Amino acid sequence: MAGKKENRRNIIALGWASFFTDLSSEMIFPLIPVFLVDVLGAGKAFVGLVEGIAEAISSLLKAFSGILSDRLGRRKPLVVFGYSFSAFSKGGFALATAPWHVLAARSLDRVGKGIRTAPRDAIIADSTVSESRGRWFGFHRAMDQSGALAGALIAGAVLKWHFADIRNVFYLSLVPAFIAVILLIFFVKEVKGKGPVPFALAVRGYTPGYWAFVGVNTLFNMGFFSYAFFILQADATGYVPYQVSLLWFEYNLVYVLVSYPAGFLLDRYGRKKGMLVAYLLFITACVVAGTVSAQLTLLIVFAVYGAASSMYQTASRTYVSELAGPEKRASGIGIFYLFTAAGNFVSSVAAGWLWSLYGASAAFALGVSAGLLSFILGAFLFRETGNTSQ
């Protein structure tokens, strides 16, 4: 858009808010599968159910909050409320004494994520220009996962050298969660949408290219199951809880190192190529995880999985924000997440069911199948946006 100036203060403030929120979240989320199975006695199918329901709730609300943001023509209040809700929910994990308590706490946390994500991504897109949008989404992804990196390292240190009880890590996670809320309140400036956009307009009128992207990525997410299953594979291979946290540290380190370069490559070579590379990386991670169970091999798996997640998240957020267009950007982002939710729910529940009945290889075969089909369809159906978008 000619003459448009970037609002870098917004992008940087949102980056730091995501840093502290993910520091809080990733101190505890990688430990939840182990906590459920080893401490509370839940089955692996229940782990899949927890992840599936939590992500479904999150993405359903992403659609609602995106449409609401465009309807109101405002972003910031929804972003602040969403981060605040997640912060207050963190104490529920420490107080859990039964598997369903964890399900409730995880679901409440995802309510907050669902409310904030589409308006936040819309602020980032509205605060940038097309020529550098991929890099700024990459920057945000890097800050987000840098917090996850720090959270995994802190959790591993606490479990190893101080308080072996996982619940102590859950309590400690409350501190950075509330720091993020303070940053949002004082440093993010409202970016008004093109609205108010009527509800009927917010849910229709998207281009065939937008729906092709949504459809293929829904298919991909039917195999792009939760990280919990990679962690369960590590647990089954003999990693103890503090080692799981350090393995998660490796995943996040690779994610951070890839994010900004991934955004740069998106700006230079196009969004379509980035999506296809992400699919191939995830297929590779699943093939190796499902066929080799050695501890050393899992170090490679988590590195490739980190690169796949980083490329996918950076490319998909950049791509959908452009395909949706500036008039109803938050709505388009939210609807994309809604369909992503359907895929995530299917993949997490199906992977848990397959693992319980047929073993880990069957669960990872699901990821390979969905990834390969999505790559083929994406190669034919995706179109480039790049610098021609608004």
Image (cartoon, rainbow, N blue to C red):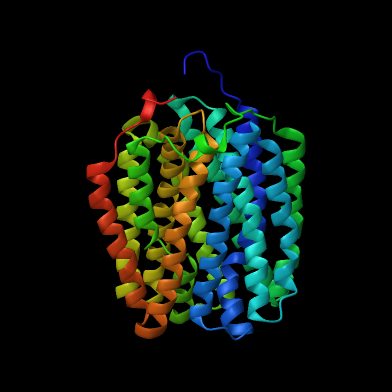
Residue placed furthest toward the top:
3
Q: Nearer the viewer, residue 157 or 262?
A: 262
Up-down: is 27 above or below 127? Answer: below
Callout count: 0
Residue 76 falls in image quadrant: top right
- Answer above or below: position of 198 versus 2: below
Whether residue 292 is visible: no
Which residue occupies the foreground of this view, 179 or 240? 179
Residue at (58%, 46%) from the top-left corner? Answer: 117
- Is the residue 336 above or below the residue 330 in the image? below
From the image, which quarter does the C terminus lie in? top left
Q: Position of residue 353 (x, y in %)?
A: 42, 78
Q: Is residue 279 left or right of residue 151?
A: left
**Where is residue 179 shown, x and y percent of the image?**
75, 48
Left or right? Give the position of 34 relative to 133. right
Q: Position of residue 203 (x, y in %)?
A: 49, 41
- For the point 68% across and 75% down, the residue is 101
Decide if residue 151 is on the left or right side of residue 356. right
Q: Residue at x 69, y 69 (%)?
A: 158
Residue 248: give x, y in percent of width and height: 52, 63
40 in relation to 306, above or below: below
**Residue for point 57% across, 33% down:** 198
Q: Is residue 109 left or right of residue 334?
A: right
Which residue occupies the extreme front position in the image? 200
Residue 335 in view here: yes
